[in-house]
Image: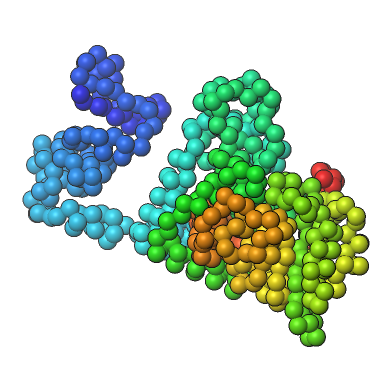
């Protein structure tokens, strides 16, 4: 069987091809392929590659296939191909390694597609490999249900490689389809059997600014089994942590990423500009981060204690001699989300100090312990070597790194901190560059967050207040 791959420009009608495709198609031994297909998927199954001057001949050599040329491409005449036409006498004999070095290393000049700076070929290859890997994760078409207008372009960018169709009813779905929803929001009524579900949620290095301010994220998580904050079921992250077999290189990468995060003071939202100083008389300082009590992370990740004030009261009772600092959630401070039950003002009677505008990274570096329900601040505290006490069941609890008041019995693995970091910040999330709009790495996302934070500091608080006012007029307080 001969497979004739038609050039994409010919298939699109923009250029004229060499073959009379109608006549070729009448030959039973020839199959005409005009679809957009990754060349490697064809080359790796072929016994030989026949070309005139196509680049696919060079790629065939890379895959160790016999290559027959009917023109004089740059890779012909070196003793590596069988050539129908005579090649220039100036061409001698070369090894495949010499040809590859000349064609891909020595001859071209490369520019990093994210920084615009000169780079080596390996950086470009890594970037291209990441794009292909991420674009092939999901089916060619996915159906997104229940997304607001501002999130729709974000869904498309994080699902690049798939055709995203936004739907309002399950009648548009059939068995075998993939439906995408936000977090733990209900699935569409009447969902057919055999439909797979993909749940999206903010990542752990998200932005400079709050999600409730409609700030576009740098990272999301995209989970096929559940979602990381739902302790009632296994998520992709939990499964990864339970079964992780990390390489030395992955752990070294996680350690380096953790060190940079701690040194730079970056956290999920990177808000707050005030300076907080540890009381000189405090022998032990305990930080209690507040949460938005209506969030699904409390509904699905906390059982006995479900409010900020109940947590604060429990911590105060268990630590009578500690200096207890309470930090309300930044969405609540900004007026973008409602306060919890019992009103946040009750916190003044249950702690020693309330801190509102200090950056979380600075606070975590100055306290001794962090007590949480399910707050991501507990994970960020672990990165900084702090003792973390969990009263709920966050994703980072149950692995031997935290003190767990209500442990998750199915989490039986004992992990190192770098193993937790590798799964949580490298393997699980999806990162999309705000510079290029393409998939990127957590290391590059960290670079962009640092640049973003510096720009935000220069922008000034008046601009942030104006943006927040506009958002509140558009969406109100949830």
Residue 345 showing in the rendered view: yes
**Residue at 47%, 45% in the rendered image:** 134
The total number of labels drawn is 0
Residue 20 showing in the rendered view: no
User: Which quadrant holds the C terminus?
Assistant: top right
Q: Is residue 141 left or right of residue 460?
A: left
Q: Nearer the viewer, residue 404 or 50?
A: 404
Task: Please tell me whether residue 400 is drawn above or below residue 53 in the rendered image.
Answer: below
**Residue at 16%, 39% in the rendered image:** 67
Q: Residue furthest front?
A: 409
Q: Nearer the viewer, residue 41 or 437?
A: 41
Residue 1: quarter of image: top left
Q: Nearer the viewer, residue 241 or 472?
A: 241
Percent of width and height locating residue 30: 23, 21
Q: Is residue 107 left or right of residue 129?
A: left
Question: What colour scheme has been applied to the protein in the rendered image?
Answer: rainbow
Residue 48: quarter of image: top left
Q: Is residue 18 left or right of residue 375?
A: left
Q: Residue furthest top?
A: 26
Task: Please tell me whether residue 474 is drawn above or below residue 51 in the rendered image.
Answer: below
Percent of width and height locating residue 138: 49, 37
Percent of width and height locating residue 471: 80, 48
Percent of width and height locating residue 197: 58, 34
**Residue at 79%, 47% in the rendered image:** 294
Q: Is residue 385 left or right of residue 83?
A: right
Q: Nearer the viewer, residue 333 or 3?
A: 333
**Residue at 62%, 58% in the rendered image:** 397
Task: Please tell me whether residue 268 is drawn above or below residue 297 in the rendered image.
Answer: below
């Amino acid at each position: 069987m001969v497979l004739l791959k038609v050039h994409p420009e010919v298939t699109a009608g923009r250029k004229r091809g060499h073959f009379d495709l109608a006549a070729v198609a009448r030959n039973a031994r020839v199959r005409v392929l005009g679809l957009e297909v990754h060349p490697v998927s064809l080359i790796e199954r072929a016994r030989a590659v026949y070309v005139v001057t196509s680049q696919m001949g060079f790629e065939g050599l890379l895959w160790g296939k016999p290559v027959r040329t009917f023109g004089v491409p740059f890779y012909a005449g070196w003793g590596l191909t069988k050539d129908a036409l005579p090649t220039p006498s100036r061409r001698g004999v070369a090894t495949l390694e010499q040809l590859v070095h000349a064609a891909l290393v020595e001859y071209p000049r490369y520019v990093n597609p994210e920084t615009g700076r000169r780079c080596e070929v390996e950086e470009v290859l890594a970037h291209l490999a990441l794009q292909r890997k991420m674009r092939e994760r999901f089916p060619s078409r996915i159906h997104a249900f229940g997304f607001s207008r501002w999130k729709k372009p974000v869904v498309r960018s994080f699902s690049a490689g798939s055709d995203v169709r936004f739907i309002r009813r399950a009648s548009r779905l059939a068995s075998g389809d993939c439906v995408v929803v936000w977090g733990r929001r209900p699935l569409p009524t009447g969902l057919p059997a055999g439909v797979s579900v993909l749940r999206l949620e903010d990542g752990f290095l998200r932005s400079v600014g709050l999600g409730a301010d409609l700030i576009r994220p740098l990272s999301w998580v995209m989970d096929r089994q559940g979602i990381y904050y739902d302790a009632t079921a296994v998520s992709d992250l939990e499964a990864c942590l339970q079964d992780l077999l990390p390489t030395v290189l992955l752990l070294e990468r996680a350690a380096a990423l953790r060190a940079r995060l701690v040194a730079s003071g970056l956290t999920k939202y990177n808000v707050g500009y005030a300076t907080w100083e540890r009381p000189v008389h405090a022998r032990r300082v305990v930080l209690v981060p507040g949460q938005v009590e209506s969030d699904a992370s409390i509904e699905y990740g906390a059982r006995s204690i479900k409010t900020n004030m109940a947590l604060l009261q429990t911590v105060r009772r268990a630590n009578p001699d500690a200096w207890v600092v309470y930090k309300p959630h930044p969405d609540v401070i900004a007026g973008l989300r409602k306060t919890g039950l019992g009103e946040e003002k009750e916190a003044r009677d249950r702690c020693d100090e309330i801190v509102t505008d200090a950056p979380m990274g600075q606070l975590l570096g100055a306290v001794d312990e962090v007590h949480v329900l399910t707050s991501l601040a507990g994970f960020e505290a672990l990165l900084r070597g702090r003792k973390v006490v969990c009263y709920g069941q966050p994703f980072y609890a149950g692995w031997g790194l935290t003190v767990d008041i209500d442990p998750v019995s199915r989490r039986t693995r004992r992990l190192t901190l770098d193993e937790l970091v590798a799964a949580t910040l490298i393997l699980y999330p999806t990162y999309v560059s705000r510079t290029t709009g393409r998939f990127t790495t957590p290391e590059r996302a960290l670079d962009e967050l640092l640049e973003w934070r510096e720009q935000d500091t220069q922008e000034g608080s008046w601009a942030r207040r104006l943006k927040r006012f506009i958002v509140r007029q558009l969406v109100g307080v949830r």
